[in-house]
Image: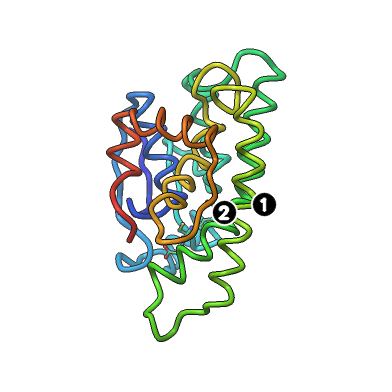
Protein backbone atom coordinates (compact mmCIF):
# COMPACT_ATOMS: atom_id res chain seq x y z
CA UNK A 1 0.00 0.00 0.00
CA UNK A 2 1.15 3.55 -0.69
CA UNK A 3 2.69 5.34 2.26
CA UNK A 4 2.74 9.11 2.80
CA UNK A 5 5.09 10.62 5.35
CA UNK A 6 3.86 14.01 6.54
CA UNK A 7 1.34 15.87 8.67
CA UNK A 8 -2.28 16.65 7.80
CA UNK A 9 -2.05 20.41 8.50
CA UNK A 10 0.73 20.94 5.94
CA UNK A 11 -0.33 22.60 2.69
CA UNK A 12 2.05 20.40 0.69
CA UNK A 13 0.87 17.21 2.38
CA UNK A 14 -2.81 18.17 2.03
CA UNK A 15 -2.33 18.30 -1.75
CA UNK A 16 -1.41 14.61 -1.81
CA UNK A 17 -3.97 13.41 0.76
CA UNK A 18 -6.78 15.27 -1.03
CA UNK A 19 -5.84 13.77 -4.42
CA UNK A 20 -5.53 10.23 -3.04
CA UNK A 21 -8.97 10.53 -1.45
CA UNK A 22 -10.45 11.91 -4.69
CA UNK A 23 -8.99 8.91 -6.53
CA UNK A 24 -10.14 6.43 -3.86
CA UNK A 25 -6.59 5.04 -3.64
CA UNK A 26 -5.85 3.50 -0.22
CA UNK A 27 -2.76 4.70 1.62
CA UNK A 28 -1.32 5.00 5.10
CA UNK A 29 -0.17 8.28 6.60
CA UNK A 30 2.82 8.26 8.94
CA UNK A 31 3.15 11.45 10.96
CA UNK A 32 6.30 13.50 10.33
CA UNK A 33 7.17 17.19 10.49
CA UNK A 34 6.87 20.13 12.91
CA UNK A 35 5.46 18.87 16.25
CA UNK A 36 5.67 15.26 15.09
CA UNK A 37 9.39 15.61 14.24
CA UNK A 38 11.17 12.69 12.59
CA UNK A 39 12.10 14.55 9.41
CA UNK A 40 15.60 15.59 10.51
CA UNK A 41 16.86 12.06 11.16
CA UNK A 42 19.41 10.30 8.98
CA UNK A 43 16.78 7.69 8.06
CA UNK A 44 14.34 10.35 6.81
CA UNK A 45 17.07 12.28 5.06
CA UNK A 46 17.86 9.16 3.03
CA UNK A 47 14.29 9.22 1.75
CA UNK A 48 14.00 12.99 1.37
CA UNK A 49 17.27 14.98 1.51
CA UNK A 50 15.27 18.23 1.91
CA UNK A 51 14.06 16.99 5.32
CA UNK A 52 10.61 18.31 4.37
CA UNK A 53 7.16 16.72 4.05
CA UNK A 54 5.55 15.07 2.13
CA UNK A 55 7.44 11.99 1.02
CA UNK A 56 5.65 9.27 -0.93
CA UNK A 57 6.71 5.63 -0.74
CA UNK A 58 5.28 3.34 -3.39
CA UNK A 59 6.99 -0.04 -2.93
CA UNK A 60 10.66 0.58 -3.72
CA UNK A 61 9.90 3.94 -5.29
CA UNK A 62 10.39 7.04 -3.14
CA UNK A 63 9.34 10.51 -4.30
CA UNK A 64 9.42 14.02 -2.84
CA UNK A 65 8.22 17.43 -4.14
CA UNK A 66 4.47 17.57 -3.67
CA UNK A 67 3.56 18.82 -7.16
CA UNK A 68 5.67 16.06 -8.71
CA UNK A 69 3.85 13.58 -6.47
CA UNK A 70 0.52 14.92 -7.80
CA UNK A 71 1.69 14.46 -11.39
CA UNK A 72 2.99 10.95 -10.61
CA UNK A 73 -0.25 9.82 -8.95
CA UNK A 74 -2.50 11.34 -11.61
CA UNK A 75 -0.42 9.65 -14.33
CA UNK A 76 -0.23 6.31 -12.51
CA UNK A 77 -3.98 6.10 -11.82
CA UNK A 78 -5.06 7.90 -15.00
CA UNK A 79 -7.29 10.39 -13.22
CA UNK A 80 -7.59 14.18 -12.88
CA UNK A 81 -5.33 14.91 -15.85
CA UNK A 82 -7.00 16.69 -18.77
CA UNK A 83 -6.95 14.50 -21.92
CA UNK A 84 -6.31 17.39 -24.29
CA UNK A 85 -2.57 18.31 -24.28
CA UNK A 86 -3.32 22.03 -24.27
CA UNK A 87 -5.77 21.74 -21.37
CA UNK A 88 -3.20 19.60 -19.56
CA UNK A 89 -0.52 22.24 -20.08
CA UNK A 90 -2.89 25.00 -18.93
CA UNK A 91 -3.60 23.11 -15.71
CA UNK A 92 0.09 22.29 -15.28
CA UNK A 93 0.94 25.97 -15.54
CA UNK A 94 -1.08 26.71 -12.38
CA UNK A 95 0.78 23.97 -10.51
CA UNK A 96 4.04 25.76 -11.32
CA UNK A 97 2.50 29.18 -10.67
CA UNK A 98 1.39 28.02 -7.24
CA UNK A 99 5.02 27.17 -6.43
CA UNK A 100 6.61 30.30 -7.86
CA UNK A 101 3.97 32.90 -7.04
CA UNK A 102 0.85 32.14 -4.99
CA UNK A 103 2.51 30.08 -2.24
CA UNK A 104 4.98 32.86 -1.48
CA UNK A 105 2.18 35.42 -1.37
CA UNK A 106 -0.45 33.61 0.74
CA UNK A 107 1.87 31.70 3.03
CA UNK A 108 3.50 34.87 4.39
CA UNK A 109 0.36 36.15 6.15
CA UNK A 110 -0.46 32.52 7.00
CA UNK A 111 2.92 31.99 8.67
CA UNK A 112 2.85 35.34 10.48
CA UNK A 113 -0.81 35.38 11.59
CA UNK A 114 -1.31 31.69 12.34
CA UNK A 115 2.07 30.24 13.27
CA UNK A 116 3.82 33.24 14.87
CA UNK A 117 3.14 34.67 18.33
CA UNK A 118 1.53 38.17 18.09
CA UNK A 119 4.55 39.97 19.59
CA UNK A 120 6.89 38.35 17.07
CA UNK A 121 4.87 39.08 13.93
CA UNK A 122 6.47 40.92 11.04
CA UNK A 123 3.67 43.34 10.16
CA UNK A 124 5.46 44.73 7.09
CA UNK A 125 5.78 41.20 5.71
CA UNK A 126 2.07 40.56 6.41
CA UNK A 127 1.07 43.70 4.48
CA UNK A 128 3.33 42.79 1.60
CA UNK A 129 1.94 39.23 1.54
CA UNK A 130 -1.66 40.50 1.54
CA UNK A 131 -0.94 42.88 -1.36
CA UNK A 132 0.79 40.09 -3.31
CA UNK A 133 -2.05 37.65 -2.56
CA UNK A 134 -4.68 40.06 -3.88
CA UNK A 135 -2.60 40.80 -6.97
CA UNK A 136 -2.16 37.07 -7.66
CA UNK A 137 -5.85 36.35 -7.07
CA UNK A 138 -6.72 39.07 -9.61
CA UNK A 139 -4.67 37.15 -12.17
CA UNK A 140 -6.42 33.88 -11.34
CA UNK A 141 -9.80 35.64 -11.39
CA UNK A 142 -9.24 36.83 -14.92
CA UNK A 143 -8.34 33.33 -16.09
CA UNK A 144 -11.26 31.66 -14.28
CA UNK A 145 -13.59 33.99 -16.18
CA UNK A 146 -12.76 31.87 -19.24
CA UNK A 147 -12.92 28.35 -17.82
CA UNK A 148 -14.64 26.52 -14.92
CA UNK A 149 -11.41 24.85 -13.74
CA UNK A 150 -7.81 25.70 -14.55
CA UNK A 151 -7.38 22.63 -16.80
CA UNK A 152 -10.68 23.16 -18.66
CA UNK A 153 -14.18 21.85 -18.04
CA UNK A 154 -13.28 19.42 -15.26
CA UNK A 155 -11.49 19.44 -11.94
CA UNK A 156 -7.85 18.32 -12.32
CA UNK A 157 -4.58 18.34 -10.36
CA UNK A 158 -3.96 21.93 -11.47
CA UNK A 159 -6.77 23.01 -9.13
CA UNK A 160 -5.25 21.34 -6.08
CA UNK A 161 -2.39 23.58 -4.84
CA UNK A 162 -4.21 26.81 -5.67
CA UNK A 163 -7.39 25.36 -4.18
CA UNK A 164 -5.66 24.85 -0.84
CA UNK A 165 -4.14 28.32 -0.97
CA UNK A 166 -7.58 29.74 -1.79
CA UNK A 167 -8.90 28.22 1.44
CA UNK A 168 -6.11 29.94 3.37
CA UNK A 169 -6.74 33.21 1.52
CA UNK A 170 -10.47 33.15 2.39
CA UNK A 171 -9.98 31.98 5.97
CA UNK A 172 -7.20 34.35 7.02
CA UNK A 173 -8.24 37.59 8.76
CA UNK A 174 -6.96 39.80 5.91
CA UNK A 175 -8.36 42.39 3.51
CA UNK A 176 -9.57 40.84 0.28
CA UNK A 177 -10.77 42.39 -2.94
CA UNK A 178 -13.75 40.87 -4.76
CA UNK A 179 -12.89 38.07 -7.13
CA UNK A 180 -16.21 36.76 -8.49
CA UNK A 181 -14.71 34.08 -10.74
CA UNK A 182 -12.37 32.80 -8.04
CA UNK A 183 -15.29 32.80 -5.61
CA UNK A 184 -17.45 30.68 -7.95
CA UNK A 185 -14.62 28.20 -8.50
CA UNK A 186 -13.89 28.17 -4.74
CA UNK A 187 -17.57 27.41 -4.02
CA UNK A 188 -17.36 24.43 -6.36
CA UNK A 189 -14.29 23.18 -4.48
CA UNK A 190 -16.06 23.69 -1.15
CA UNK A 191 -18.82 21.34 -2.35
CA UNK A 192 -16.31 18.48 -2.77
CA UNK A 193 -16.44 16.13 0.26
CA UNK A 194 -12.69 15.41 0.20
CA UNK A 195 -11.83 19.10 0.03
CA UNK A 196 -13.99 19.53 3.12
CA UNK A 197 -12.25 16.63 4.86
CA UNK A 198 -8.64 17.36 3.96
CA UNK A 199 -8.49 21.12 3.45
CA UNK A 200 -11.42 22.85 5.17
CA UNK A 201 -10.13 21.80 8.57
CA UNK A 202 -9.19 25.20 10.02
CA UNK A 203 -5.81 26.89 9.97
CA UNK A 204 -3.11 25.57 12.28
N1 LIG B 1 8.71 22.07 -2.38
C1 LIG B 1 8.39 21.14 -1.32
C2 LIG B 1 8.13 21.95 -0.07
C3 LIG B 1 7.82 21.07 1.11
C4 LIG B 1 7.65 21.88 2.38
O1 LIG B 1 8.02 23.07 2.45
N2 LIG B 1 7.05 21.26 3.39
C5 LIG B 1 6.87 21.91 4.67
C6 LIG B 1 5.42 21.72 5.13
S1 LIG B 1 4.26 22.52 4.06
C7 LIG B 1 7.77 21.26 5.70
O2 LIG B 1 8.22 20.13 5.53
N3 LIG B 1 8.04 21.97 6.80
C8 LIG B 1 8.87 21.45 7.86
C9 LIG B 1 8.13 20.54 8.79
O3 LIG B 1 6.93 20.27 8.65
O4 LIG B 1 8.80 20.07 9.74
C10 LIG B 1 7.16 20.33 -1.72
O5 LIG B 1 6.33 20.88 -2.45
O6 LIG B 1 7.04 19.15 -1.34
- Look at 64% across and 23% down and name the residue there: 146
The N terminus, quarter of image: top left
Give the residue number, with chain letter if any, for mark 2: 103
Give the residue number, with chain letter if any, for mark 1: 100
- Look at 66% across and 34% down and name the residue there: 142
Residue 181 in picture, x, y percent from top left: 54, 32
Q: In this view, does 53 lie above or below 2?
A: below
Task: Rate crowding at label 2 as few (under 14), some (14 to 19) or many (20 or more) other CA atoms within 10 Å.
Answer: some
Rendered image: mark on residue 78: none
Q: In this view, does 187 lie above or below 35?
A: above
User: Residue 199 occupies which quadrant of the picture?
Assistant: top left
Residue 82 in picture, x, y percent from top left: 59, 18
Cα separation between marks 2 and 1: 7 Å
Q: Is mark 1 on a helix, strand or loop?
A: helix
Considering depth in this image, is 198 or 124 the residue closer to the camera? 124
Q: What element carries label 2?
A: helix
Residue 35 in picture, x, y percent from top left: 31, 68
- Would residue 135 be found to the left or right of residue 42 on screen? right
- Look at 62% across and 29% down and name the residue there: 91
The C terminus, quarter of image: bottom left
Amino acid sequence: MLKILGRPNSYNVQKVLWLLDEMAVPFTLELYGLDHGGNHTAAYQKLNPNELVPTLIDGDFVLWESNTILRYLATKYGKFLPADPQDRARGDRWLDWALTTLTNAVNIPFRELIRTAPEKRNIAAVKDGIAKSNKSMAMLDQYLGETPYVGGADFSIGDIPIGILAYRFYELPIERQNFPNVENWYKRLCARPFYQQRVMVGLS
